[in-house]
Image (spheres, rainbow, N blue to C red):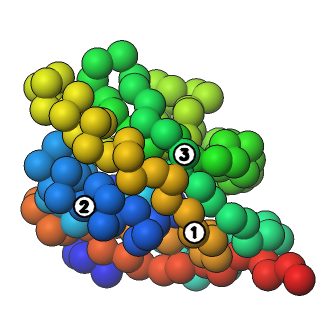
Amino acid sequence: MNVSATESALIVSVPAAEPVVGLLRSRLDTSAPLGVPAHITVLYPFLAPGLLDDEVMGELGRLFGRVDAFDLSLTRVGWFATEVVYLVPEPQSVFKALTAMVADRWPDWPPYGGVHPDPIPHLTVGDDEDYASMVEAASAVEPLLPVETTVTEIELIAGDATPGSWKRLATFPLRWVD
């Protein structure tokens, strides 16, 4: 593990979105230069990296192992006021259930530190950049949608404010159903 890591997060990484949003994210998403891939957050912040022991890892594996793999479609562009432009994932209900499941198990780690207790699932394209740049990004991405993929795992990542510091610590497979 990155010994300087100060935070962790549980995410659904979406590599299929990188060709559509990768270059835009590198300029407009504050998490991209840190090494965070295109993703939809399950829970951030999660446990401090020093608390990620074998017991926690085992519990995460058991929790996520009871969740069915699912198809994901990034269907349209959305906005949080004028500060964040993002892609809307469908189905939203699965992400809300994943977040609730983990937050219920670790209630001392609420979504976004309790600032957004009922978070809206999203894949950030840009945040806190100038509005005109984000409008351009939204216009560039929209014709390339939908992006479709299958979600088969949840990732645990950790890092700090240093560029490139966020790394994958573990993956937790979801259950395959026929």
Residue 17 vs residue 6, the one in the foreground: 17
**Mark 3 sits on what residue?**
75
Q: Is residue 75 visible?
A: yes
Q: Secondary structure at mark 2?
A: helix
Q: Are marks 3 and 1 in contact (CB under 8 Å)?
A: no
The residue depicted at 63 percent of the width and 71 percent of the height is 150
Amino acid type of disc 1? Thr
Q: How many marks?
A: 3
Residue found farthest to the front: 143
Q: Is 1 displayed left or right of 29 in the figure?
A: right
Quadrant holding the C terminus: bottom right
Q: Which of the two marks, 3 or 2, is nearer to us in this view?
A: 3
Amino acid type of disc 3? Thr
Percent position (x, y) of residue 83? 27, 23
Please, is residue 80 above or below residue 6 in the view? above
Q: Secondary structure at mark 3?
A: strand
First-in-chain label (3 vs 2): 2
Residue 105 vs residue 171, the one in the foreground: 171
The residue depicted at 73 percent of the width and 71 percent of the height is 69
Label ID, residue 22:
2
Percent position (x, y) of residue 166? 26, 67
Amino acid type of disc 2? Gly
Q: Is 151 displayed left or right of 130 in the figure?
A: right
- Report the Cα–Cα distance between label 3 and label 2: 17 Å
- Report the Cα–Cα distance between label 2 and label 1: 16 Å
Label ID, residue 149:
1
Please, is residue 112 above or below residue 45 in the view? above
Residue found farthest to the top: 81
